[in-house]
Amino acid sequence: MSTHTTTSREKRWYEQITIDLIALILQRSIFHPFIAWLIPLCQRAVGAPYESFEFRATCSYAAFITLVWMLSVINKRLAYGVPRELDWDEEVVVVTGGASGLGKIMAEMYGMRGASVAVLDVHKPAKESEGLAGVHFYQCDVGDAAAVEKAKTEIEKDLGPPTILLNNAGIVNGKPILSLRPSEIQRNFNVNLLSHFNTIRTFLPGMLASPIGGTIVTVASVLGKLGASHLSDYSAAKAGLIAMHTSLRAELSSSNTAPAGAENIRTILVTPGQLSTSLFAGLETPSSFLGPVVEPVELAREIVRMVDAGESGHISMPLYARCIDWLHILPVGLQRFVRACSGVDRAMEDLRASKETLSAAKRANNSTAEEKN
C-alpha cells in the first residue's frame, strides 16, 4: 500500500516472515477443518473421556471451523456460480502487456504447457525464454480499438477464437496532477482503462458464441480503492477498472438482459498491492511484515490457478489489500492518521526526489570527468 525508496539488497531471513505467511500457515493448520478435527481425535486416542471439558471444547472449535468453511464455500457458489469446464484443445489465451512483468510470467506459464497463447504489447519481449518459445506475439497498442480489432483477426487466423483474456497492460506516470501533460493523462487512460473496454468489446462476443465460454481477468490495483499522491491518473484508471468489472459481472448475471452464452463466462478481478515489477521499481514498503511487496510469480500463480479451475472470483494480495475496504468505515481523522503512518502519499514523491538526486549526481560526475579529460 505504501512505499519509500531504498537501495536494492538481498532480504534477510527474518524479512521473509510476514503477516501473510503467518495467515497462510494458520489457514492450512488450526483454521482448516481437517486439522481442527484431528485435535479431539488425538484426545480420544490418549483416553480423554467424552464428557471432559477439553474434548468438548475442541469438538466445539472443530464444529465452528467446519461451519465457517462450509458457509464460505456456499457463499462463493452463490456469488460466482459453478466453475466452467476448460478444454485446452480449444482454449486460446490472450495476454495484454505480456512483454514484461506480470503479463510475461503468465504468458510463460501457459506457453510452457504448450497452450495457445497470444501476447499483445507495443514492445517485444526484451529477453526470450523457454516459456515464450511457442507464444505468438502481436505488436499492438491496446489503447487503440482499431489495433485490437486487427490483432483479433490475426489471432483467430493463427490460433482460433480467444477464450481466456488476461487484461494486464499498464503504465505509470508518477507525477503530481499539476505536472501531468494532457498527452500523459490521455495515454494513462488509454492503456490503464480504455484498453480493457477495447479488448472486452472485441473478444467477449466470440466467448459468448463459443460452447466452452470464456474467462476475463481484470488486473486492477488496490490503489483503485485507496488512491495516492502523485498517482491520481493511475488510481483513477484503476478505480474505473474495478467499477467496470462490477458492471460487467452485473450485465452477465442479469436474468433479464444478459446476452446469450453469458452463463459460460467467468470473471476474475485482481487488486494487488505493490508488485516488484518495473512499474514501481525503487519502492519498498516501510514494513516488510505488515505490507510485503508481492512477487509477480506468486500473483501469476494464483491467477492461473483460478483460471484453470474455471472459477470467477476476486484475488487480492497481500493481506492488507483484502482489508482496505474497512479503511473507509473509519472516522476521517483516523483514516488520515493511517495514511500518514503507511507513507502511501509520500512514496512517489520520495522516489521522484531520489531519482532527481541520482541524475544530478551522475551529471556532476560526467562534468568532472570531462573537465579532467
Image (cartoon, helix red, strand yellow):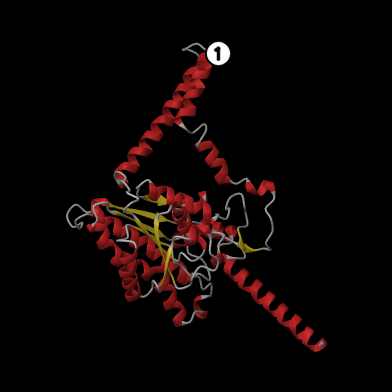
Q: Amino acid at mark 1?
A: Val
Percent x, y of residue 89 = 33, 51
**How many dots with numbers?**
1
Residue denoted by label 1: 46
| Residue under the point 26% across and 61% down | 206
User: Quick one: SS at disc 1?
Assistant: loop
The quarter of the image holding the N terminus is bottom right
| Residue under the point 67% across and 63% down | 6
Please say if 13 is above or below 133.
Answer: above
Please say if 50 is above or below 353.
Answer: above
| Residue under the point 62% across and 53% down | 287
Q: Quadrant of residue 276?
A: bottom right
Percent x, y of residue 5 = 64, 65
Any part of residue 137 in sight: yes
The quarter of the image holding the C terminus is bottom right
Percent x, y of residue 273 = 51, 57
Judge the density around disc 1: few (<14), some (14-19), many (≥20) Cα neighbours within 10 Å. Answer: few
Please say if 150 is above or below 69.
Answer: below
